[in-house]
Image (tube, rainbow, N blue to C red):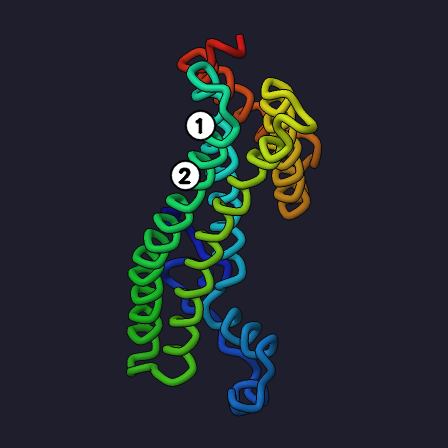
Amino acid sequence: MLRGKRGGVRGRETPPPLPPREEREKPLSSMTFRERARYYDELTGVFAISRRYFVIGAFDGALTVLGLILGATGYSDSPSLILAAGFATSVALAVSSTFGAFEAESVEQDLAHDEIQSAMLRKVGGDKVAAHRFAKVVSSLIHGVAPMVAGLLPLVPFLLVPGVLAFRQAIAVAAGLTFVFLFVLGAYLGTLTRRNVAVAGVRLVAVAMATAAITLLIGGHGVL
């Protein structure tokens, strides 16, 4: 898991700034969910953390399931087998990512909380404890949902076999959908970092294509 600088924790040595006094004094019970989420983000940087987890999870999910498809096609032309194996892989990725992220974030959020207490020379509770708990849950769920959703995308064409698509056509469409999805994901990252959007998208696609070529060489003999 990544342990770099957080969106809300401006480095390991500096605690995050507290929200304005008037906003802090507004009771949590009177806040809408959106207001509470923004307030917790100011305390923990959970939105930046979740964005990072979403990108990692989506990239892993899409590429893993595409690799499974390309690696298995040399041994089976059964769409039901591909669908079952791909769905099971997506679920396994979701479960492992969710609990892996939760364990990692539990440590990171506890460390961040301890640092703030050390910097302030007093015990910090209340909203900060609730904010760290919120950050753990939200970031973990996003890291779990992202690979499952992205992993299901390459499976969609196999729902159309044999009525609409032939098996080999479904393979090509699955690869195309994955490449388009990863290009959009890379382009989105490019907009965040103000880099060239096309270059950012092509970078992810290049990695995906290299991975696809390797998995075809390993198991996709029926496609080559």
Which mark is first along the chain, 1 or 2? 1
Q: Residue at x 48, y 39 (%)?
A: 61
- Residue 75 sits in which quadrant? top left
Lateral position of residue 34 relative to residue 118, left or right: right
Q: Label 2 crowding class (10 Å Cα cut-off): few <14, some 14-19, many 20+? A: many
**Residue 175 image position (x, y, % from top left):** 59, 26
Mark 2, secondary structure of its residue? helix
Residue at image coords 41%, 58%: 140
Crowd rating for badge 1 (residues with CA inside 10 Å; few <14, some 14–19, many 20+): some
Give whichever of 17, 200 is nearer the camera.
Answer: 200
Instruction: Give amino acid for label 1.
Output: Leu
Closer to the camera in the image, 134 or 150: 150
Q: Nearer the viewer, residue 110 or 28?
A: 28
Q: Position of residue 187 (x, y in %)?
A: 67, 39
Q: Disc 1 marks which residue? A: 68
User: Which numbered disc covers residue 89?
Assistant: 2
Give the vertical position of 16 relative to 36 (above or below): above
Does 175 appear above or below 105? above
Q: Are marks 2 and 1 in contact (CB under 8 Å)?
A: yes
Residue 198: image location, x then y, percent: 70, 31
Residue 209 quadrant: top right
Real-space Cα distance between discs 2 and 1?
9 Å
Query: What residue is rendered at 63% in x and 37% in y?
Result: 181
